[in-house]
Image (tube, rainbow, N blue to C red):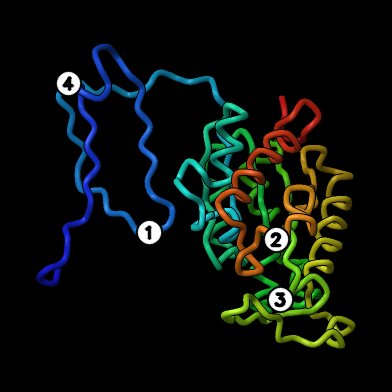
């Protein structure tokens, strides 16, 4: 640490804050920075929590599920949705890196889960990392691996929310002071370049095909959570603001976890 710099903030929570009696404490680490947990200390006995009876929801997505721009770790849209639905969240989202990597599929396969959701597509378009020909089998392979560990767990495949720059124009994208810009050519779409509309079409088709033999696989168009009418809440043209993330979480709690939702009871 250089001279003159301030020490990193330290979270403190003791009996003076909590009051007398047994309390259940959840520790939410910040989502927008790297965190090193040095120690946990208490001035009374600490015991494991009693079983909550809540379902464990494992979610994987991009920066739009990582939610760096949220106003708190409890303000990310998966956290908002999980709180409203009474679910225990395991958020495995990776900003800029939802690329259908096999190790992520293996991690989900090996993680206990009552519910699973996968929000994929935006990073593969922004990085132009797949063509239509390679994207399709990559999604199938990812799902195959997850199903090896969770053959009948409700699984929701979610397509990207709106992103005006790459709805009909392929990536790769470039961040500019005016916002995100697509650098691909529309003419390349006919040759297999991916746009968000092409991704949504592909994901919907995959879910429909696999759904004939997998009744617990479902598809959700991400624009139902954050569509063209919400584009004004994308300050950089890609990522929602804090209020936008909360809105997505509230909508997902209704659409995903509601009485008729694919993750509802």
Say whether disc 3 or disc 4 marks the residue closer to the N-terminus: 4
Q: In which quarter of the image is residue 188?
A: bottom right
Q: Quadrant of residue 223?
A: bottom right
Crowding near pointer 2: few (<14 within 10 Å), some, many (20+)?
A: few
Above or below for 250 versus 259: below
x%, y% of residue 158?
A: 73, 51
- In the picture provided, is 37 more to the left or to the right than 69? left
x%, y% of residue 37?
A: 26, 48
Say whether disc 3 or disc 2 marks the residue closer to the N-terminus: 3
Crowding near pointer 1: few (<14 within 10 Å), some, many (20+)?
A: few
Q: Which mark is residue 44?
A: 4
**Mark 4 or mark 1: which is in front?**
1
Say whether disc 1 or disc 2 marks the residue closer to the N-terminus: 1
Say whether disc 2 or disc 4 marks the residue closer to the N-terminus: 4
Element on which disc 3 rests: loop
- In the picture provided, is 197 more to the left or to the right than 175? right
CB of mark 3 within 8 Å of CB of mark 2? no
Above or below for 156 versus 139: above
**Mark 3 or mark 1: which is in front?**
1
Element on which disc 4 rests: loop
**Residue, disc 1:** 33
x%, y% of residue 155?
A: 71, 42
Q: How far apart are marks 3 and 1 (CA)?
A: 29 Å
Element on which disc 2 rests: helix
Say whether disc 3 or disc 1 marks the residue closer to the N-terminus: 1
x%, y% of residue 88?
A: 52, 32
- In the picture provided, is 194 more to the left or to the right than 179? right
């Amino acid at each position: 640490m250089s001279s003159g710099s301030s020490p990193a903030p330290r979270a403190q929570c003791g009996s003076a804050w909590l009051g007398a009696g047994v309390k259940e404490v959840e520790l939410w680490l910040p989502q927008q920075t790297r965190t090193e947990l040095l120690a946990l200390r208490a001035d009374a006995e600490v015991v494991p929590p009693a079983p909550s009876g809540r379902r464990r929801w494992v979610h994987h997505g991009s920066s739009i599920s990582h939610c760096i721009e949220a106003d708190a770790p409890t303000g990310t849209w998966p956290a908002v949705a999980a709180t409203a639905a009474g679910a225990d969240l395991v958020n495995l989202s990776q900003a800029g890196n939802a690329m259908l990597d096999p190790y992520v599929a293996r991690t989900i396969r090996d993680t206990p889960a009552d519910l699973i959701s996968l929000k994929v597509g935006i990073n593969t378009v922004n990085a132009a990392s797949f063509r239509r020909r390679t994207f399709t089998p990559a999604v199938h392979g990812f799902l195959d691996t997850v199903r090896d560990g969770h053959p009948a767990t409700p699984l929701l495949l979610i397509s990207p929310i709106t992103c005006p720059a790459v709805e009909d124009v392929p990536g790769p994208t470039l961040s500019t002071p005016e916002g995100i810009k697509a650098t691909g050519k529309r003419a390349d779409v006919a040759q297999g370049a991916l746009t968000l509309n092409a991704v949504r079409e592909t994901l919907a088709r995959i879910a429909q095909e696999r759904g004939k033999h997998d009744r617990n696989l479902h598809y959700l168009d991400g624009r139902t959570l954050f569509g063209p009418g919400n584009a004004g809440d994308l300050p950089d043209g890609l990522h929602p603001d804090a209020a936008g993330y909360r809105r997505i979480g509230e909508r997902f709690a209704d659409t995903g976890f509601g009485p008729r939702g694919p993750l509802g009871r």
